[in-house]
Image (cartoon, helix red, strand yellow):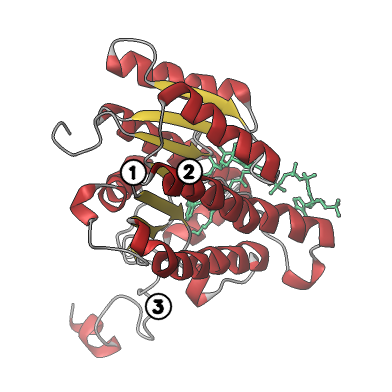
Amino acid sequence: MNGSGFAGRTYVVTGGGSGIGRAIALALGAADARVVVAGRTPQKLEETVALIDQEAGHAGRALAVPTDVRDPAAVDALVTAATDRFGRLDGLVNNAAGNFVAPGIDISPNGWRAVVDIVLNGSYYCTRAVARQLREQGTGGSVLSVIATYAWHGHPGTVHSAAAKAGVLAMTRTLAVELAPLGIRLNCVAPGPTETAGAGAALWATDEARAEVLATVPAARFADPAEIADASLFLLGDRASYLTGECLTVDGGQWLGKQVYGRGATPAARGRG
Ligand SMILES: CCCCC/C=C/C(=O)SCCNC(=O)CCNC(=O)[C@H](O)C(C)(C)COP(=O)(O)OP(=O)(O)OC[C@H]1O[C@@H](n2cnc3c(N)ncnc32)[C@H](O)[C@@H]1OP(=O)(O)O
Ligand SMILES: NC(=O)C1=CN([C@@H]2O[C@H](COP(=O)(O)OP(=O)(O)OC[C@H]3O[C@@H](n4cnc5c(N)ncnc54)[C@H](OP(=O)(O)O)[C@@H]3O)[C@@H](O)[C@H]2O)C=CC1
């Protein structure tokens, strides 16, 4: 990815210790960017840093900053740690999330808060802190938030996450307009079912649940986190320089694949096949 414009730039990736966040952090590192990974579990963050250093062939390209994104003071400290270490920031990936499946009216207030605080409030605190730093630098930059297609179509069993992701999409579109004059772009990526341990445990913990999810994907497979990372780097980088307030869906056709007749054109056509 040399020549992609990432060399020497610095990006904060929340939830960079696992799954999609780790894949994005590794892709940024491989594109010669400097990467600051944030999350609650220091060991997972250090593993990502070690993988980036290993790929680079030397230490120093990445930094782990244990952070709970629900805590605005901790988020401000994250941005300070990143700029102390690398001198400046160029962007942010809001990837941290929590999720579980439960009937909407049975979720406790604390269960609702757990998810909304991480996904919506955490994304706002991180975006606010990074955008203030970019404004101070006068450099512009790019913010990418990882959402889900149910931000717009809804989804039974995940009302907390769907509502929070919809909020992140609205935040993205609102701040895209407010911050465009500062050269700051904000976009979203909406992955479909992606093979990660976190989502597997939270959303498709049994073989039956996994098969049920798979049956909804026209592409008939889960995404690899690296495929989400590819789309993410496009949105973060200079090739998307005139693109702001948008959401790129990377879901193997899942959310569009809800036709009355399933995947065949019509029952009659399928009968002939
Ligand atoms: C199909 C394709 C679309 C998929 C789109 C989206 C996918 C994703 O978001 S995948 C990301 C999945 N990754 C994770 O979820 C990892 C992180 N997860 C967590 O940290 C937890 O799951 C968390 C969100 C619950 C937060 O953990 P923590 O802050 O430690 O909170 P507690 O365990 O103390 O629980 C707080 C509160 O929530 C209630 N709760 C937890 N799990 C469930 C459940 N399965 N059902 C009902 N309620 C649950 C828990 O009981 C607590 O409430 P109170 O008991 O009232 O205190
Ligand atoms: N996998 C999928 O099918 C899909 C995933 N997504 C989205 O992709 C993103 C990544 O999910 P995925 O990689 O699958 O799942 P993971 O569970 O691997 O990723 C979630 C990450 O968020 C971090 N995190 C959770 N709570 C906090 C917190 N309070 N503060 C800081 N970090 C936190 C976790 O680290 P730690 O626990 O150490 O803090 C973890 O690294 C999420 O936004 C998810 O909603 C969207 C659609 C589909």
Q: Is residue 136 visible?
A: yes
The picture quadrant where one finds residue 42 is: top right
How far, Cα to Cα, is label 2 from label 1? Answer: 24 Å
* Closer to the eye: label 2 or 1: 2
Q: Which residue is mark 1?
A: 229
Residue 272 against residue 61 in the figure, above or below = below
Q: Is residue 66 left or right of residue 230?
A: right
Residue 65 against residue 183 in the figure, above or below = above
User: Which one is earlier in the sequence, the residue at label 1 or at label 3?
Assistant: 1
Q: Amino acid at mark 2?
A: Gln
Q: Position of residue 149 (x, y in %)?
A: 45, 67
The extreme top residue here reads 58
Q: Nearer the viewer, residue 229 or 172?
A: 172
Which mark, residue 160?
Answer: none
Q: Position of residue 44 (x, y in %)?
A: 56, 25
Residue pictured at 65% horizontal, 68% vertical: 159
The extreme left residue here reads 3
Q: Which residue is mark 2?
A: 133
* Closer to the eye: label 3 or 2: 2
Q: Which residue is mark 3?
A: 258
Residue pictured at 29% horizontal, 45% vertical: 233
Label 2 crowd (10 A; few <14 / some 14-19 / many >=20): many
